[in-house]
Amino acid sequence: MSGHKAVGTFYLVMAVLAGLVGGSLALPLRAGQAAGGAWMAIDHGALMVLFCALPALVGGFGSWFVPLLLGAPDMAFRRLNLACWAGIAASFGLVVAGVSTAGAMMLWCVAMLGLAINIVATALNMRGRGVGLGDMPLFVWAQVLTAMMMVIVLPVLAAALTRGLLAGAAVDVAARALRVFSGPEVGLLLLPAAGVICQLVETFSGVALCLRRPVLGAMVVLSVGGASVWVHDLFATGLAAQPAARPLVEQAVMALPMLVLLVAWGRTILAGRPVFRVPMLWAVAFMAMLVAAPLQALAVGGSDAHALVLPAALFAAFGGFYYWIGKMAGGAYPEGAGRFHVALAVGGSIAGLVPGGMMAGVAMQGLSMVVFVAVLGVALLGRRHVAGNYWGTGARTLEWTLPSPAPRDSFAGFMVGGAGA
């Protein structure tokens, strides 16, 4: 039976494949050449969210590092963890094959719901002795709050899809459900991404995160508030009777917690001596995207604000990859190539926002993925091995007490404290 590290690796591999597929579609979609594709009821953005960003941030990093940061030997439900990955991979295959978009999304909802339950159960019952809830790293808290948000959101989405399937209107319902899902999708992307950024800022600033309690409170607000943002994009389709101020309230529920996080990250960087290695550069790019999103919303009336959230989440995922790749594979990444990857990805995102720069932006982002695959290959070859804690004194969480790559049975003899710890 595969352990949590193997399943986490499966998630990350699938996320890379989905990113390559989604990225290969970006240029023809922008050029209007693939509008009639067989499976385009689910668009490029939804493909990247459902099968790349969320599986990487929650399935990949969650399965890999939630147990390690808690001192747990594995996830609470090992078989369920593998079954959930298989369900998400199968739904990805169904979507790409054009078999059934609504059916694939139903399967995705069930699998992600199982993953969410597993993460919450692991945090509540599998903590090492002496690791209380208040002692959990903010990365783990972000994973738990994302999982709790999924428990609220995904049954609603699954119910809408089931109704459409039973009524014989699966394609229309799938498209409508994806549009409605764009509200809570923002919180589902930003929460686990924020957890990764907390790890990066603490490590590369060399000090503990400032304003820990306000940050945790902001994450709770983002989780609960994000789960309620269901009608943000549907005011032109029959919801005119809703209060006119509601969109502003919903945007504030999402924006104010992120402002608290930005202040905490900024204070931590100023309080320490930041070292701008590749993971930290991704963290800075993520913060820049968070600042740009509300400015973009004000400039264009909010219509393109969602377009900045997905790149921001992907920046956090890349930051996590460069941060933990040595712990996962045992090999070092090439620093120069990693910096080139950052420059191409950020430059492509900026170019895509400039009028007339869409094609150049997509081309730069495509080249950045080529560089990323090359970096991944170098790291996996492991010709330059890394130490157990290759980031130094700034890396304080439990995974850095283990050798690199992390042993298959990490913390197997570690006493589990459970809910009473």
Image: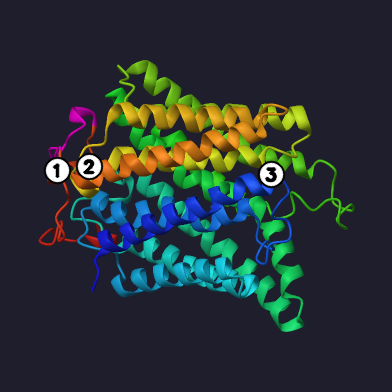
Q: Which residues are magenta?
A: 384-394
Left or right, 36 with reference to 383: right
Which residue is under mark 3? 30
Near mark 3 (Cα within 10 A), the count class, few <14, some 14-19 or many ≥20, is some
> Residue 67 location, x and y as percent?
27, 56
Q: Quadrant of residue 122?
A: bottom left
Q: Residue furthest left?
A: 413
Q: Disc 3 on helix, strand or loop? A: helix
Residue type beneath disc 3: Arg
Which residue is under mark 1? 401
Which residue is under mark 2? 326
Distance in Å between CA atoms under marks 3 and 2: 36 Å
Front residue of this view, candidates 140 and 160: 160
Colour option used:
rainbow
Comes first in the chain, label 3 or label 1: 3
Of the two numbered discs 2 and 1 in the rendering, the one whose residue sits closer to the viewer? 2
Residue type beneath disc 2: Gly
Proximity of marks 3 and 2: CB atoms separated by less than 8 Å: no
Picture layout, residue 112 above or below residue 369 = below
Mark identifier at residue 298 = none
